[in-house]
Image: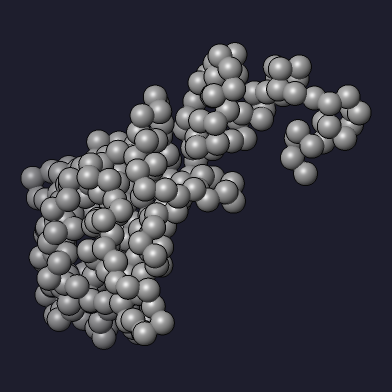
Amino acid sequence: MDTVKIISLADPEQKSLMNMPVSLIFKIAGSLDPVERTVLRTVNKAIKNVADSLPPVYESMSITWGRFNSLLWKFNKNPTKHSGKGKLEKLSKIPGFKVNNLRLRSNQRISRTIFDPPETKLCDVLPEDSFLNAKNVDICVATLNDAIQLLSIAKPGDLESIRLWPLQSSEREHFSRFFETEQFKKAKNVEILSLQGFNPEVLLNFSHLESFKIKLSGDFVEEDFLRIREMISKFEKFEKCEQRIVSGFQLRNICEALGIKTPGGTFKSITHRYQIPGSKKCLEFKIDGGGPNILMKIVRIR
C-alpha cells in the first residue's frame, strides 16, 4: 500500500497535495521516477519547485529493446515501465539527470520462426545522438551490432565501465567496431565475458584502461603467455586485470614459458612477480590452472 493510501485510511478527512505536510510531499516526489515526476511538475508552481529540488540521480535504469521494435525503460526497483517514441531522449533535458548503473537488454532473437513479428531495426527507434549520463553500462543482447547501437545511448564523457555479456553468435570480425566506439575508448574499466577466436594481440585494444576482465578463446601456444606479459607491462594506465583463457595447457608448461620456477609434484596455482623493465614497479601474477581454463589475475604493484 502506498503512502497516499495509508494517509487516507488513517484520516477520514480527504487529503490533497496542498494540505499535506511538506515532508510528506518530498517523500512522495522522491519515490517517483523522472517520468512520473514530470507529471507532478504540472500541478502548480509550489509542487513544481518541490519536484525540481530533488536531484535527478538514479541508482539504476533498465532499457529493453522489445520484439515489436519498441524501447521500454524503468528506474531503480520501480516496476512501472515507460515507452513511447521520442520520449526517452527527453530525459536529457532534465537538468542534472544521471544514472549510476544502466542496463541495456534486447528481447530479439537471431533464429526466427513464422510466429515472430516482422524483422525490425534497432536504429529505427534509437535517438540519433548519445544522451544519457551513465556511470556504468551492462549490456546483454543477441548480436554485437545490437550492443554497439544500444551503447550509443550513453554519453562517452561520464561513462567509466562497460560490461558485455556473451553474445548468441561469434562475431569476431565486428569487434573492431566495438573497440572503435568513443564509449569504449573513454572507459576506464571493461568486462567482456566472451572473446572467441582471438590471439593475444587483441589485448592491445585494452591499453588505455585501468582495469579489464575478459574471457579469451583461440589458437594459443605457451609462448603467448610471455607476449601477454610483455604487452601489459607497457600499458601506462594499467592497474589490474583478470583473464580467463580457454586452453588445454598444463600450468607447468606455462610457467616454463614465463621463466617461473615451479615446485616439485603437482600444483594448481602459482604467484609470480615480474619487474617492469625500466621501472620500479612490477606486475604480480596469480595463475590458476586447475581446470579446462587458465585464470590469470594480474595486478600492478607500485
Say which of 138 and 1 sits in front.
Answer: 1
Residue 246 in sight here: yes
Does residue 270 appear left or right of residue 50 in this picture?
A: left
Q: Quadrant of the N terminus?
A: top right
Q: Position of residue 194 (x, y in %)?
A: 29, 70
Residue 275 in sight here: no
Which color scheme is applied? one colour
Q: Quadrant of residue 36?
A: top right
Above or below 109: residue 177:
above
Say which of 216 and 117 sits in front.
Answer: 117
Above or below 233: residue 99:
above
Q: How many marks?
A: 0
The residue that appears at 88% across and 24% down in the rendered structure is 13
Say which of 61 and 269 sits in front.
Answer: 61
Q: Quadrant of residue 121?
A: bottom left
Above or below 205: residue 221:
below
The residue that appears at 22% across and 63% down in the rendered structure is 145
The residue that appears at 29% across and 66% down in the rendered structure is 120
Q: Position of residue 167 (x, y in %)?
A: 31, 71
The residue that appears at 58% across and 17% down in the rendered structure is 44
Q: Position of residue 140 (x, y in %)?
A: 37, 63
**Residue located farthest toward the top when viewing the structure as drawn:** 46
Q: Position of residue 171 (x, y in %)?
A: 19, 73
Q: Quadrant of the C terminus?
A: top left
